[in-house]
Amino acid sequence: MDHPTEIAISVETRYLPEQSSPEQTHFAFAYQVTIENKGQRTAQLLNRHWIITDAEGRVQEVRGPGVIGEQPVLHPGERFQYTSGAVLPTPVGSMHGSYEMLADDGRSFEVPIPPFRLAVATVFH
């Protein structure tokens, strides 16, 4: 079955040195997510599911309602942008996941969030 609408996800990340303590293996990152409704139906973001992996392969899963305390409704052509954060015990990691959306016809569907990298700018592999 086709998704009732097309949702595009893009993410920008940055390292937060002022909130990090490398000597205590505490690396803080911000990520800005843009969710854009490119389809023909209105859809609401109901839930989020994140999988956060650090450089040593440790995985944290985060599930919950909405994003930043909101469950935004996106009409065709609309976008919603928010910034959140993650803290890792390593200077490099990655995140991916999905949003559960509800279309205006009552069908729920998953929107995958493609993997993105969290990295301190001075770390190269």
Image (cartoon, helix red, strand yellow):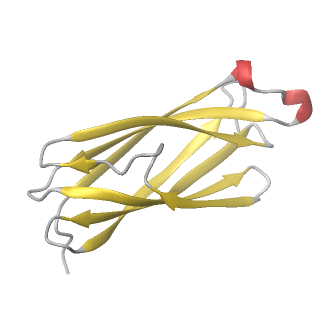
Residue extending farthest to the right is 23
Residue 1 appears at what percent x and percent y?
20, 81
- Can the viewer see residue 49 in this picture? no
Q: Nearer the viewer, residue 81 or 51?
A: 81
Camera-side residue of 69 and 90: 69
- The answer to whether residue 112 shows anywhere in this view is yes
In percent of width and height, residue 47 lies at 43, 61
The outermost residue toward the bottom is 1
Residue at x 24% of width, y 40% of height? 79
Q: Is residue 106 above or below residue 49?
A: below
* Frontmost residue, 19 versus 27: 19
Please tell me how many numbered marks the rendered image carries. 0
Residue 20 is left or right of residue 34, and the answer is right
**In the figure, residue 92 lies in which quadrant?**
top right
| Left or right position of 1 against 114 | left
Q: Name which residue lies at 40% across and 46% down.
A: 70
Splitting the image into 4 quarters, where does residue 16 fall? top right
Residue 80, how many percent across, how many down? 30, 39
Q: Position of residue 81 (x, y in %)?
A: 35, 36
**Residue at image coords 69%, 59%:** 60
